[in-house]
Image: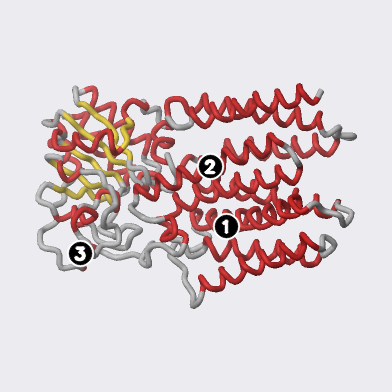
């Protein structure tokens, strides 16, 4: 029986690996989700059989309740709310790991192997930090908690002191496993630490924070696997933890930021509101209405659309699809340029565009399309800001200096659709607005793009 169980665990682990591999591309993401889901189903069934569960009543009840909640959330949550949901699910994973570790500690009779005790403390620490940290991330994305960088005197020293306190208390508990009150204190401090670590991170860095917290949830799961001596949980948690760290590193490179810079507070001005009109930039902003813009599109052959968080907020993806269809019906070549950190989570723009039934073949990553902007007639920017700001290339005083950006300014004409001239999350003006080949198309993305589509069809 044990051999069958281990083989089943191995098979489900292979499915997890295939799932992660397929999730690396929008085209195969659905297949990847299916592989991972089947692998998890096998792992759960085999684990229940392996542990010789005496009664399944509570397991069935919990499974039914969770399934109903999950189905409702899947149906009710809009694509624009997916970052919040991902943040919340990360938290649930970390919280579950902490609860399992705590329950295992309570079951012990006072004699704990050192390696098990260390695993329990690690699960409590990482799981607790992941839970509250993810809830703060959810709150920032949902607008419940401020998206600004929140700093207070001595915050890093306070965080370091709490971490040292948890480690010291954990070492004492490993030696004296009967100290329940101290163990509960570790849980409490870990929960507080999650809040104080994520609260300073600004809204601009939420994609990185979400990815990092996802990695934390995997590491918490792996440490809990050591507590339960379950090989499958160790493998699954390690895969999630490692892939999350790799993705976090990729996103930090895309922003030209170090992970420590993000974790320790990020941009001071993140989330602030300002206006480019208040600065002393040389140049004049030129704006167009939908009729003028439609005529410009009518003589263009190549169009690249750059989506940003503004498109997500306005839920304009369906309007964008209608514009694409109208332009293609007139023989235009239309593609999308996707920056790695556009939106509020990795792949946010891809998910939104896919929801609007836009072909994955049209969605090109930054490195695949950047060299083609000089051959592009129109670059249409919808709600993006910092990821297209040329200051990242030459202004060494800019907080985004060195960040790889989409080379939209190399296009023959750049059209920027925004509600206003407000700054992005980095808190700086976008000098692109003042470029001689740039045109501002003001208005809510959904309404503005719909009006433009109407005019394009009528030409």
Q: Earlier in the sequence, mark 3 or mark 2?
A: 2
> Where is residue 269, by image quadrant?
bottom left
Residue 239 percent coordinates (x, y) = 57, 38
Element on which disc 2 rests:
helix
| Residue at mark 2 | 242
Q: Earlier in the sequence, mark 1 or mark 2?
A: 1
Is 307 positioned to the left or the right of 168 in the image? left
> Visible in this render: residue 264?
yes
Element on which disc 3 rests:
helix
Q: Is residue 80 above or below residue 121?
A: above
Q: Earlier in the sequence, mark 1 or mark 3?
A: 1
Residue 236 percent coordinates (x, y) = 62, 36
Q: Mark 1 vs mark 3: give the one in front.
A: 1
Q: Residue at x 42, y 25 (%)?
A: 27
Q: Which mark is residue 62?
A: none
Residue 281 percent coordinates (x, y) = 14, 64
The quadrant of the rendering that contains the C terminus is top left
> Visible in this render: residue 450?
no
Element on which disc 1 rests:
helix
| Residue at mark 1 | 133
| Residue at mark 3 | 277
Q: CA distance from mark 3 to mark 2?
A: 44 Å
> Where is residue 49, by image quadrant?
top right
Q: Residue at x 65, y 43 (%)?
A: 222
Coloring scheme of the render?
secondary structure
Q: CA distance from mark 1 to mark 2?
A: 19 Å
> Where is residue 19, by image quadrant?
top right
Q: Is residue 180 above or below residue 237?
A: below
Residue 437 percent coordinates (x, y) = 11, 47
Q: Residue at x 56, y 69 (%)?
A: 160
């Amino acid at each position: 029986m044990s051999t069958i169980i281990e083989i089943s665990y191995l098979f489900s682990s292979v499915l997890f690996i295939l799932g992660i591999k397929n999730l690396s591309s929008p085209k195969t993401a659905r297949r990847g989700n299916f592989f991972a889901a089947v692998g998890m189903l096998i792992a759960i069934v085999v684990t229940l059989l392996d542990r010789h569960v005496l009664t399944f009543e509570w397991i069935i009840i919990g499974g039914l309740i969770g399934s109903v909640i999950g189905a409702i959330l899947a149906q009710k949550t809009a694509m624009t709310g997916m970052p919040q949901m991902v943040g919340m699910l990360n938290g649930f994973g970390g919280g579950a790991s902490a609860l399992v570790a705590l329950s295992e500690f309570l079951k012990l009779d006072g004699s704990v192997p050192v390696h098990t005790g260390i695993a329990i403390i690690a699960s409590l620490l990482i799981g607790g930090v992941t839970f509250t940290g993810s809830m703060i991330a959810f709150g920032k994305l949902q607008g419940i908690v401020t998206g600004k960088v929140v700093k207070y005197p001595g915050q890093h020293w306070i965080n370091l002191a709490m971490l040292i306190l948890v480690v010291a208390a954990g070492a004492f508990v490993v030696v004296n496993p009967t100290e329940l009150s101290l163990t509960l204190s570790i849980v409490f401090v870990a929960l507080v630490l999650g809040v104080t670590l994520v609260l300073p991170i600004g809204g601009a860095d939420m994609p990185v924070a979400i990815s990092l917290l996802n990695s934390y949830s995997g590491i918490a799961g792996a440490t809990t696997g050591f507590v339960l001596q379950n090989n499958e949980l160790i493998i699954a948690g390690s895969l999630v933890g490692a892939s999350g760290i790799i993705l976090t590193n990729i996103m930090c490179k895309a922003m030209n930021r170090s992970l420590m810079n993000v974790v320790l507070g990020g941009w001071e001005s993140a989330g602030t509101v300002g206006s480019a009109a208040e600065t002393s930039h040389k140049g004049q902003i030129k704006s167009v209405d939908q009729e003028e813009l439609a005529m410009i599109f009518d003589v263009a052959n190549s169009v690249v659309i750059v989506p940003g968080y503004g498109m997500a907020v306005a839920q304009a993806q369906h309007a964008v699809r209608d514009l694409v269809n109208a332009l293609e019906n007139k023989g235009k070549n239309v593609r999308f340029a996707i920056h790695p950190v556009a939106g509020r989570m990795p792949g946010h723009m891809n998910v939104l565009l896919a929801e609007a039934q836009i072909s994955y073949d049209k969605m090109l990553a930054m490195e695949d399309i950047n060299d083609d902007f000089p051959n592009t007639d129109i670059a249409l920017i919808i709600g993006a800001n910092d990821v297209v700001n040329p200051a990242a290339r030459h202004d060494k005083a800019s907080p985004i200096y060195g960040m790889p950006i989409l080379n939209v300014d190399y296009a023959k004409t750049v059209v920027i659709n925004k509600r206003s001239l407000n700054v992005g999350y980095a808190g700086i003006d976008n000098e692109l607005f003042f470029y001689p080949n740039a045109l501002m198309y003001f208005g809510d993305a959904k309404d503005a793009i719909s009006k433009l589509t109407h005019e394009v069809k009528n030409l």
